[in-house]
Image (cartoon, rainbow, N blue to C red):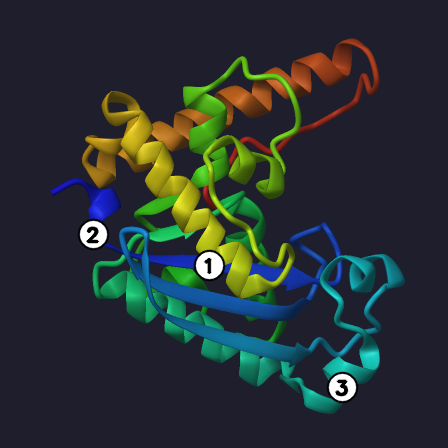
Amino acid sequence: MSWWHEPLVGFDLETTGTDPAESRIVTAALVDTVGSRRESTTSWLLDPGVPIPAEAEAIHGIGDELARGRGRPAKEGVEEIAAALCARILAGRPVVAFNAPFDLSLLDAELRRYGLPGLAERLGGPVTPVLDALAIDRAVDKYRKGSRTLQRVCEVYGVELTDAHEAGSDALAAVLVAVALGERYPAQAGEVELAELHRRQVGWYREWAEGLQSWLRKGKDPQAVIDPRWPMR
């Protein structure tokens, strides 16, 4: 049976910023599914230990008062998130994300920040298999015009995104987009064995990063550097 009919786990973080090396986790969610059917959602609200910028609060709706009053201490929450994610990977569930290098790299940076074992250490090897709905969409529909935000990609694939920037909603949407991609593009993604699809995404992401870097250097920013590593930096 194709992977998009099988157990999956959607993963999403809402954070204090856009730099995965420096930003902190505010909310997180893991959504367990079988194909597109949601089984359960596990969510966390953390006190990140630093002020939440107004621009971040405007996106996900969590401010300092709520995070400090109701959020788990950051170190405890980060440990729980990593443990839960790794348990699912070790049980055979592929991780599904939208822009995996951000979420996985940020979680790994948080683990290092608190002196906790990283993801690779917990798993005894690389984080795999990962299904990155954004990376796959860029590759299989390379020349489609317009933005590739989660909201826009959901529109393209007929996925309902009920509460954008709520971690549980975004994690489920990433799974639903991945399932839609698997169904629509069987030869490129849907009927491909997971280990091979993971390898393909490594190449697809590198090709995209190198293309964007070249384009930026020709015009907007001659010194631009786009990190080509996937699914973690």
Q: Which residue is mark 3?
A: 68
Q: Are marks 2 and 1 in contact (CB under 8 Å)?
A: no
Residue 133 in picture, x, y percent from top left: 45, 39
- Cα gap from disc 1 to disc 3, whole angstroms: 23 Å
Sequence-earlier tag: 2 or 3: 2
Residue 47 picture quarter: bottom right
Q: Label 1: how many residues lie within 10 Å, few (<14), some (14-19) or many (20+)?
A: many
Sequence-earlier tag: 1 or 3: 1
Residue 233 in view? no
Q: Which residue is mark 1?
A: 11
- Position of 63 compared to 157: left or right? right
Locate the N terminus and report the quarter of the image it occupies. Answer: top left
Residue 140 in view? yes
Q: Nearer the viewer, residue 124 or 175?
A: 175
Figure check: 51 above or below 71: above
Farthest residue in the right direction?
A: 54
Residue 180 in picture, x, y percent from top left: 36, 37
Figure check: 139 above or below 59: above
- Cα gap from disc 2 to disc 1, whole angstroms: 16 Å
Q: Nearer the viewer, mark 2 or mark 1?
A: 2
Q: Nearer the viewer, residue 158 or 95?
A: 158
- Position of 122 compared to 70: left or right? left
Residue 137 in picture, x, y percent from top left: 46, 29
Q: Are marks 1 and 3 in contact (CB under 8 Å)?
A: no
Q: Identify which amino acid the numbered label 1 is placed on.
A: Phe
Q: Identify which amino acid the numbered label 3 is placed on.
A: Arg
Farthest residue in the bottom direction?
A: 69
Q: Nearer the viewer, residue 61 or 51?
A: 61
Figure check: 155 above or below 91: above
Q: Which residue is mark 2?
A: 6
- Cα gap from disc 2 to disc 3, whole angstroms: 38 Å
Q: Nearer the viewer, residue 113 or 30?
A: 30
